[in-house]
Amino acid sequence: MKTTIAVYEEAFKDFSPSGELLKIFTYPSPILKKVAKPVEDFNEDLKSLCLNMLYTMYKAPGIGLAAPQVGISERIFVMDIDYKREAVTRADGTNDYQLSHFNPMIFINPVIENKKGEILYQEGCLSVPGVYEDVKRAEEITVKFQDWDGNHHTIEASELLSVCIQHENDHLEGIVFLERLSMLKKNLLMKKFLKKKKKGK
Ligand code: QAP
Ligand code: CO
């Protein structure tokens, strides 16, 4: 599935990830529970934050990353659900990923409207590494957001794009995908994760 948002296709024609690797906060860090603040200043700092978030997401590698996950409580997330990832073996025998066909998207101050239908999709999260579970979401949504220049856009999203936007938007509300599961599943997966984390993976 190729998802195009015209504004980013223009801006990121010859994109390749670069910048600074940011620290990803993992569950149960308190930053993940906070409601994030709207972005008001559309300046160069915002652009470099977005680029560093994209760089960190591709390095992980992941398909979506929200600002609270890198310790910044602002309404921003970045996403790329289309890029190609090939496992390669380095000369020393260790594994790495070769990434290509980037399609970066940045959502600032997003608002989700017109949720329609239902979709079950297996989600994961860079803040809860190693945990994957089916989550029920709206199948189709309309999303209003701003780009990094502050211009307003509206898009329709379905399937993985819709699921990913809802997952990342939850981070801005202080919600991790485990909260969307039954209490039973949530408690089981959280306990498992915390036990693994305590052992140091
Ligand atoms: C959110 O998540 C998402 O456990 C983005 O060990 C995921 O990029 C929305 C990742 C799926 C919809 C469907 C997770 C990487 C990446 C891990 C991610 C891990 C390494 C998660
Ligand atoms: Co997440």
Image (spheres, grey):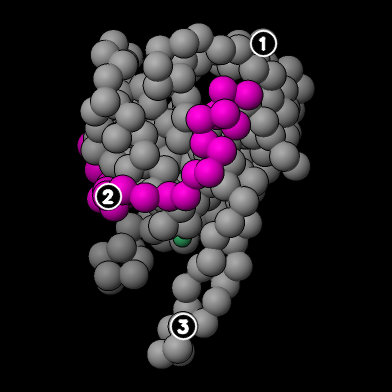
In the figure, 159 relative to 35: above or below? below
Q: What's the CA distance linking mark 1 and mark 2? A: 36 Å
Query: Does residue 17 show up magenta in the picture?
Result: yes
Query: Does residue 3 show up magenta in the picture?
Result: no
* Res 78 seen here: yes
Q: Residue at x 62, y 51 (%)?
A: 101
Q: Is mark 1 within 8 Å of ligand 1?
A: no
Along the polypeptide, which appears first: circle 1 or circle 3? 3
SS assignment at label 2: loop
Foreground pick, 61 / 168: 61
Q: Is residue 196 left or right of residue 141?
A: left
Amino acid on which disc 1 is placed: Asn
Amino acid on which disc 2 is placed: Glu
SS assignment at label 1: strand
Q: Which residues are magenta?
A: 6-30
Mark nearer the viewer, 1 or 2 = 2
Q: Crowdedness of circle 2 by 10 Å Cα count: few (<14), some, many (20+)?
A: some
Look at mark 2 in the image and give the residue it sits on: 20
Q: Are marks 1 and 3 in contact (CB under 8 Å)?
A: no
Look at mark 3 in the image and give the residue it sits on: 90
Amino acid on which disc 3 is placed: Arg
Q: Residue at x 33, y 58 (%)?
A: 194
| Residue 198 screen position, x and y as percent | 26, 65
Look at mark 1 in the image and give the residue it sits on: 114
